[in-house]
Image: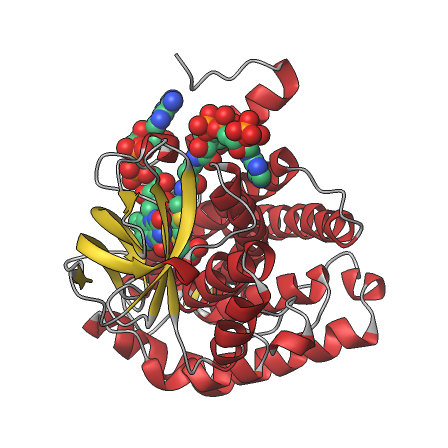
Amino acid sequence: PDLFQAPDYYNLDDLLTDEHKLVRESARAWVKREVSPIIEEYAQRAEFPKQIIKGLGEIGGFGPYIPAEYGGAGLDQISYGLIMQEIERGDSGVRSTSSVQSSLVMYPIWKYGNEEQRLKYLPKLATGEFMGCFGLTEPDHGSDPGSMITNFKDMGDHYLLNGAKMWISNAPFADIAVVWAKNEEGRIHGLIVERGMEGFTTPETHNKWSLRASSTGELIFDNVKVPKENLLPNKSGLGAPLGCLDSARYGIAWGAIGAAMDCYDTALRYAKERIQFGKPIGGTQLQQKKLAEMITEITKAQLLTWRLGVLRNEGKATTAQISMAKRNNVDMAIHIAREARQMLGGMGITGEYSIMRHMMNLESVITYEGTHDIHLLITGMDVTGIPAFKS
Ligand code: TGC
Ligand code: FAD
């Protein structure tokens, strides 16, 4: 059984409303019931468990902050964060599906789409009847998406889309893709591409050692005719996809805390029960150092993220503040996963425990949505005013 107990060392629950706690409890109970018992098997098989899609929608995992009139849960940013924390406590790959659907598919349709597009897609995305993916990264343009080459031409009654995207979460089974491409003037726009359009294929990426329970693929556009009404009309330029990333990265900052909490909780439990040299390993100074540092780092990350949530609720959080939290928390989680894995000795490398899966998953999380380096450079640019990544 899933025995997980969430640490709350600084009584952070006192900062939450009853609604926050209710939302978190329902997500936590669902993860214990529907995700934890099956996820290891799906990760080992490198398969996304599609049967959880409906439940993910029911706990607010798809569009938690999208208004109820479009089928979203209409929750605030703290509730959104808490849902991500609970889902990633189960598995980063499942949280990826939730992040992509919510912040990278529903968010741009809500913010940059017109009313017809919102009504056509958002309610079905909120329940999981439609699944979406987000195509920004290309084989030759990852950290620097502004240099993308995927493009579309105005053919009068439709657009003609050509190019390729790589490393796209949910691509192999998504019904729709929000694709970022340049027009003939080189301006970036978002287009909704639907499965079944001629010339559009989504081959799966195999042999990942990380995020194995998430399905990743390519998006290939070979003269795809996209109807004109599928262009997102209300924002263009690189700022449009970057605006979606703000929302997804914020969710990841919370999600990483969930993965770290699960590793800490598992290691603490094990350390109290595992006897070596006649006493629990948790009674040794070396293992206590690891546990004490873990709970300290989790608590710091919780405070950082809670404050960021308040700023987001007030509409005041900056991109650089979000970068700091994403970078700090994912790094924190990956360190905790590595230390926790060692605390379990040989048992730590097996699928009997969740730690090694979290550790491998976090290698993707520290890379996607802006690498660890890129977020440091965003902070560097923010404090100096000089972008170090540009020539
Ligand atoms: P830069 O010149 O800084 O900016 C270009 C234009 O965008 C504006 N802008 C923003 N607008 C809205 N929100 C933001 N957060 C914005 N940040 C910048 C900016 O004002 C400018 O506007 P304008 O009108 O002057 O044109 O752009 P740059 O090319 O120098 O790049 C900056 C950099 C490196 C920080 C950016 O490219 C970046 O963040 N790169 C990382 C790429 C990345 O994160 N890719 C993620 C792909 S999606 C993914 O990984 C999903 S994983 C699945 C899951 O979530 O689980
Ligand atoms: P590169 O940009 O080639 O970077 C390689 C290395 O160089 C990194 O260490 C990087 O930090 C470093 N580097 C780059 N530029 C600089 C610089 N100026 N200064 C110093 N160091 C630098 N993308 C999507 O669009 N949609 C998705 O759904 C999606 N899902 C993903 C799922 C998974 C499992 C993975 C692994 C990736 C996913 N991505 C997705 C892509 C992800 O966002 C990119 O992998 C990421 O942005 C990095 O791009 P890259 O892999 O091309 O690495």
Residue drawn at x 20%, y 74% is: 45
Residue 131 in sight here:
yes
Decide which of 346, 150 is in the foreground and name it.
150
Decide which of 314, 340 is in the foreground and name it.
314
In the image, taking residue 344 as reference, residue 201 lies left or right, namely left
Residue drawn at x 42%, y 17% is: 390
Q: Position of residue 369 (x, y in %)?
A: 44, 45
Compared to 377, does 385 lie above or below? above
Residue 376 in sight here:
no
Quadrant in the rendering for residue 15 = bottom right
In the image, taking residue 42 as reference, residue 244 lies left or right, namely right
Decide which of 70, 83 is in the foreground and name it.
70
The number of discs equals 0
State how the image is colored: secondary structure
Residue drawn at x 25%, y 48% is: 165
Residue drawn at x 77%, y 56% is: 10
In the image, taking residue 16 as reference, residue 43 lies left or right, namely left
Q: Position of residue 9 (x, y in %)?
A: 73, 58
Q: Which residue is outermost to the front? A: 156
Q: Position of residue 37 (x, y in %)?
A: 39, 84
Quadrant in the rendering for residue 5 = bottom right
Compared to 89, does 2 lie above or below? below
Q: Position of residue 376 (x, y in %)?
A: 51, 28
Quarter that holds the C terminus: top left
